[in-house]
Amino acid sequence: MMKYKKKKSKKMKKRVKKEAENMVSLTIDGTVITIEKGKTILDAADSLNIEIPTLCYHKALSPYGACRLCVVEIQKNGKKKIQASCVYQVEEGIEVKTQTPELQNIRETMIKLMMARAPRSEKVKEIARKLGVERTEFISKDEDCILCGLCIRMCSERMGQSAIGFKLRGDKREVSPPFDVESPRCIVCGACFSVCPTASERLKKLSSRPVQPLLDEFDQGLRQRSVVRIPFPQAVPNAAIIDKEHCVHFLNDRCKICQDLCEAEAIDFNQKEEVIDLRVGSVIVSCGFEVYDGKKERAYGNGRYVNIVTSIEFERILSASGPYQGHILRPGDKKEPRKIAFIQCVGSRTDEHKYCSSVCCMHATKEAVIAMEHSPGLACTIFYMDLRAFGKGFDEYYEKASRSGVRYIRCRPSLIEEVPESRDLIIKYSDEIGKMCAEEFDMIVLSCGLQPLKQMSELTQKLGIRLNEHGFCKTDTFTPIESSRRGLFVCGPCAEPKDIPETVTQSSAAAAKAMVLLTEARNSLIAKKEYPPEKDVSDQKPRIGVFICHCGINIGGYVNVPQVVEYTRNLPHVVYVEDNLYTCSQDSQRRIIEMIKEHALNRVVIASCTPRTHEPLFRDTIREGGLNPYLFEMANIRDQCSWIHMTEPQLATEKAKDLVKMSVAKAARLEPLKRVEIDVVQKALVIGG
Amino acid sequence: MKKIKDLQELDKTGEQGLKRLYPEGRTRVTVGMATCGLATGAEPVFNYLAALAKDREDQILVVPVGCIGFCQREPLIDALIPHLPRITFAKVDGEKVQEIARHLIQNRISVKHAAWRYDEDEFLILNTARRLGNGSLPAAIESIIHYHEIPFFQKQLKIALRNCGYINPEDIEEYIARGGYSSLYRVLNEMKPEEIITEVKLSGLRGRGGAGFPTGMKWEICRDVKDDVKYIICNADEGDPGAYMDRSILEGDPHSVIEGMLIGAYAIGASAGYIYVRTEYPLAIKRFTKAIEAAEAYGFLGEDIFNRRFDFKITISEGAGAFVCGEETSLIASVEGRPPEPRLRPPFPAESGVWGKPTNINNVETWSNIPVIIARGGDWFSRIGTDKSKGTKVFSLVGKINDTGLIEVPMGIKLGEILEIGGGISEGKKFKAIQTGGPSGGCIPASLLDLSVDYEKLTDAGSMMGSGGMVVMDEDTCMVDVAKYFLEFLKDESCGKCTSCREGTQQMYDIVKRITEGNGKKEDIELLENLGNVVKVASMCGLGQTAANPVLSTIRYFRDEYISHTIEKRCPALVCKALISYVIEPESCGGCTVCVENCPSDAITGEPKKVHVIDQKKCVKCGICIASCPPKFKAIKIVSPTVK
């Protein structure tokens, strides 16, 4: 057989040579590395995971070489020199040492000098600790700027403004705007402050214009957010988004730090909206609702009085992932309120919105109950017109709330006033026997009604369906899923206000109804979910992984989850334990799959809520991890523990440990089960009906 | 003015210049009008003589010249009467000049005012000498000492300063007469750029700005970089306090620098150049501007120089008061209009300099050596000096020495010989140390007076050549105070970019200041040594890398003074005010009350004929009392440590 070598074409040879010309080989701490020309010694060390201390260096900014902490020893042509590695470009054949007694002495001296200059800087202290330096023998100065130049480079290179620079020289050198006058180029973006290692006060005084924080929409403006962020916890898809309106790149074609640093190359500033044409057989409209804008109720002062919030704002305040991490604080002075009033029917049962919003009485009651559970001693009062507690168990819930101290006053207050100094609120109302009362509260929650989306009319015009008198999608009493057009179904609050369980029920109904129309096409677009092959673990000893959930504050607020985690580590057969904020979230599922692979788990225990909620999800997750779905056990440390032992956190923690211990012991004995399919004769007899 | 395009025209112009250098039938009187001369009162002298000459144009020609070098004796005037040697008159004031002038009008020399004479003028470039006078000298003239017998001039060899003091710096034809621009002609017509570089390499010339990098090698590196646009820079920032070598060359012989730059530009392939002059040199800037204009007018700058399709122009870039601009990357930043800050090298300016283009930077003195090397050959140059340090160096010799001034001596001369050139320590005091290299240098003690002056030896001794400053110190100099002086300068001049220099110089200064104020601690000396060594190694540029030299070298050679200051709280030189007291010796005091009356702080109490006493709490140590105490008593002494 003829063997021949394919000759490298001239073009290929040239390209290989060019690539070789662009590469440089050097030695760092004994290891040879080949890296592109133009990179620095610091870049090369970083790619070898060799750590060199830095201070004035930032990945997204051009290197400056001022702090002298990153000095290294370079041997070139038999000569030794000491240079800053962040600015020194790699050269062919040099030998670099990143740690020698001389370099250590230099770094220690440098940090001691900086400690003398800026004794209060935490960053400097941190670096000193890492270098093993405890004190400085130099004379202290008490500046708060170490002249690293990061703020200046950030402003000039990335923000494109160059509003600040260095003035004067020597120890009189200072960061300042030109001629010490506030620069009109300063866009008050705060980028300088974000890279300042000493959080220098000087940067806060650069402009007299106030900082306009971006307010988090999901948290109802109760806290700030950044331009690049994941919109809220457990968002679907769980991906970061960039706010085009405020992003500096879109504003003045600069920055792009996020894109430069993203190792996954996931950022494309040229992304455009895509319009996709779809041919469908059925449409389900479930576009939801809007909350009535509490500010429209002028007499109630929302928007004017800082301690009056809407129901949605209060929901976020209660949430563990909200602006106050689940602590109940009032927005004005961030103090804990002692008395909260709820005012019902704000924006419902009015001339504008004649209907009842259906869910507010229950959610106000729920909010009052949770608030009182969280802050013992908190008093809640609900001002209502009629209490709508019509669902299953709702009335009992209301009775229980009333018994446990929630005050219900049948009255629709007409006016709220604010006490100027304390910013407390006074509600004037007439009680059930007609007596005029005035009562002071620390905080007021307006239960705002549900209303149709602003775009409802435009949307429904395009869809060809009608709206009812209230602006919601028109349906019939006995056909609540069907819209006015065949083939279009509606579910949830876009048809009329309803709560979550009802919405979920209706959604299943709408899906079923839609499927009826699509019988011919059934299963034609389904892709069978591919699972990885199931591992055979029969000859293995049990390797149990335990995931303990905080469930926000539901579990974590009462059970000492970290303690349970430590306890679980020592249980037999347990090889891995971790705790999660929400084990049922998308990213937690991904994590579970990762940990199964990383630690070769062959059984999983999740200590969280009731199997009713998520057992199928978790079984599916571990199946994706390659395990038989029945090698799974759940410990209910919420419904059966934290929810019922709220007043005894220590005992609840002990019980949680026991519950986990039982589940782990059970899990060790679990055997994989196989699901079999049996043919069913599709005939049924119904007796009764 | 027609531009000079060939050798014939050059020679013809030279002859015109020669006619002014050696006017037939007229006396040429030159007055030293460099800054040193002007500072001592040369201008009124010049004006007097010029007014005199105005009415006697056929008899006397008065010409301003640059620094002759013997600054101690300024104002200096030379008189060249036809058929007589050149006679120099020193320390000429209003009175003297009148008498000298009276004699000159009668074609005579006022011998009693004469300082020295020259029998011939050397034309270094042309390798000839012109005899002055016609052989037989009158006895009176012969009695005037020949300048070569004067210790100040004996061991000097003028190469960079070859024309200073001889020619009118604003007269290009006088420059041409002494061989000026003939090297340029030679280079453009007879040599290839590579050959020029070879010649400079052969000469062994090293940068005269202080770093001492071999000039030929530097030119070669820049030449080898492929770029259509390259620049030449002359570093005339001369920041060392008390150094004025470059200033004198620029004021006295600016064309030597222009010619040097032209030759360098041709060798490297540059078509434009900058001279970066410190703004504190207004006279140098004025003279250099005039020189550029003259060179352009005569065709030595501009386009198609000497018909060789070689273009070159020079722009003056002024400094703004920062010592750090002497460092080349900071200088480049300043030329570009940015605040001066050094940057890392590599890349070196030869690869990427001003405006990102290959740039060759050399010092003023380096440039002015180039025409001589071309004219006389690199080999000739290399035979002067030592093994590693070739040629001569201009030093500004100042301090506690009898004859201060500018000297140019061959490399390798001993430090002790330089002291002899300076005529020994003033006021008969004892020599203590010589500080070389400005604030970047160090102090060399008496034990090393045998040291040959060259780049390596000075560095090994803990100092450096620097740009050529030499400050002589005597027993009344406190070395700790000297360190403090230089540290104060350096900390103020640090650009502030890198931690080690900015914080390091500040801390070193604070510690030394503390020591001079009597608050020194035992650990301070070791602290200074450690900090100084780190600053030396960790700083980004030459300023920081040499900032520790003053303190490290004084600790090295005068450690006992530091120990006295810190432990005994004593200043042996009796300088540091916090450590000294002024006391009246009771046995010597005559009770004359002169000091009591003169003391500005009323610190002295005393009745007539009774012993006087100084109240230490009120004494501000101004020294007026010592000055006023009558010599027959000399009762006031300075002591250290302090007394209550």
Image: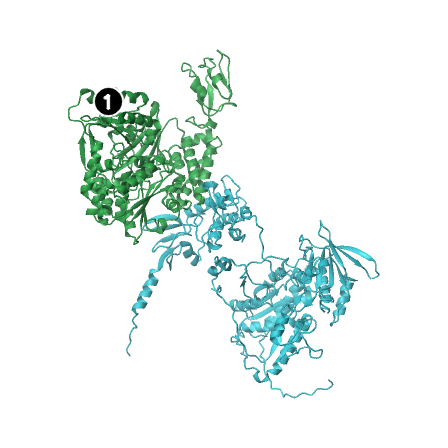
Chain colours: A cyan, B green
Residue beneath disc 1: B105
For the N terminus of chain A, the quadrant is: bottom left
The chain letter for the residue carrying disc 1 is: B
Q: Position of residue A148 (x, y in %)?
A: 47, 48
Determine which quarter of the picture holds residue A480.
bottom right
Of the pair A532 and A553, the residue shown nearer to us: A553
Q: Is residue B617 visible?
A: yes
Give the image location of residue A17, x and y in percent.
Answer: 32, 63
Point out residue B260 in the picture as x, y percentages from the top left corner: 27, 42
Q: Amino acid at mark 1?
A: Ile
Q: Is residue A218 above or below residue B267?
A: below
Quadrant assignment for the C terminus of chain A: bottom right
Figure quadrant of residue A490: bottom right
Residue ranking furthest to the left: B135
Q: Is residue A623 above or below residue A424?
A: below
Residue extending furthest toward the right:
A433
Q: Is residue A670 left or right of residue B2?
A: right
